[in-house]
Image (spheres, grey):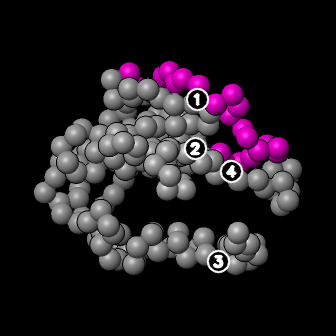
Amino acid sequence: MIIFSIKKFRRALLAVVLAGGAAVGGAAPTGLQQLRYGNPGLAVDLAVGLWAWPMPMDYDGDGDLDLLVSCPDLPSNGTYLFENPGGGGAMPVFKPGVRLGKGHRNISVSRVGGRDRILIPGREFMDFRKKGFAKSVPMFPRENIHSNDVRNNQWSLLDYDGDDRIDLVVGVGDWTEYGWDNA
């Protein structure tokens, strides 16, 4: 078992976030290129709100990554599809967003067995491409597995331990120690 101090963990997490999981400005394993901060020639307006949850996936089955974004806040509440029409290489330009349904917080996509599965805490959206995001089915008895109320509660499916069986991994953000939400 590896134990990090909170300070070392924060530094490592910051490094991963700032690097975007790849070398800054370099091509990621998907072939896409990370946008540099402060690009004055960039014209972008996703218009999906402040607390948006991005989910890259090949939504339309044409072989390139589209962007599904869920926004739980107002006035932008919704889950939006930004289609990648192709031909953009490492810097695709997505079509304007199309609202597919209600927005959700703590939503994530997991790629399992060649198909995308979208989860929210304790639940899964089955056949979301046809049925949308209005109804989900329970996949666990509780939505919060932590002893405290949490800020973030993100569920993912993956083979965590390499045993060829799908595991449920839950990441929670417990800010109790900070007192942030007690103000």
Residue kind at label 3, given as amino acid type: Arg
Residues 134 and 41: in front is 134
- The secondary structure type at the circle numbered 3 is helix
**Quick one: label 3, few (<14), some, or many (20+) residues within 10 Å?**
few
Q: On the image, numbered disc 2 is attached to which residue?
A: 168
**Quick one: label 4, few (<14), some, or many (20+) residues within 10 Å?**
some
Say which quadrant the N terminus sits in. Answer: bottom right
Alpha carbon distance from label 1 to label 2: 10 Å
Q: Position of residue 156 (x, y in %)?
A: 53, 46
- The secondary structure type at the circle numbered 4 is strand
Q: On the image, numbered disc 4 is attached to which residue?
A: 172
Is residue 62 visible to the viewer in this orientation of the structure? yes
Judged by its main secondary structure, the magenta piece is: loop
Marks 1 & 2, CB-CB < 8 Å contact: yes
Q: Is residue 168 left or right of residue 94?
A: right
Disc nearest the viewer among 2 and 4: 2
Marks 2 & 3, CB-CB < 8 Å contact: no
Confirm whether the magenta stretch covers residue 148: yes
Q: Earlier in the sequence, mark 1 or mark 4?
A: 1
Disc nearest the viewer among 2 and 3: 2
Q: Earlier in the sequence, mark 1 or mark 2?
A: 1
Marks 2 & 4, CB-CB < 8 Å contact: no
Alpha carbon distance from label 1 to label 3: 34 Å
**Quick one: label 1, few (<14), some, or many (20+) residues within 10 Å?**
few
Residue kind at label 2, given as amino acid type: Leu
Alpha carbon distance from label 2 to label 3: 26 Å
Residue kind at label 4, given as amino acid type: Val
Q: Earlier in the sequence, mark 1 or mark 3?
A: 3
The residue stretch that appears in magenta: 131-153
Q: Earlier in the sequence, mark 3 or mark 4?
A: 3
Q: Residue, x 46% and y 37% (percent of image)? A: 118
Query: How many numbered tags mark residues here?
Result: 4
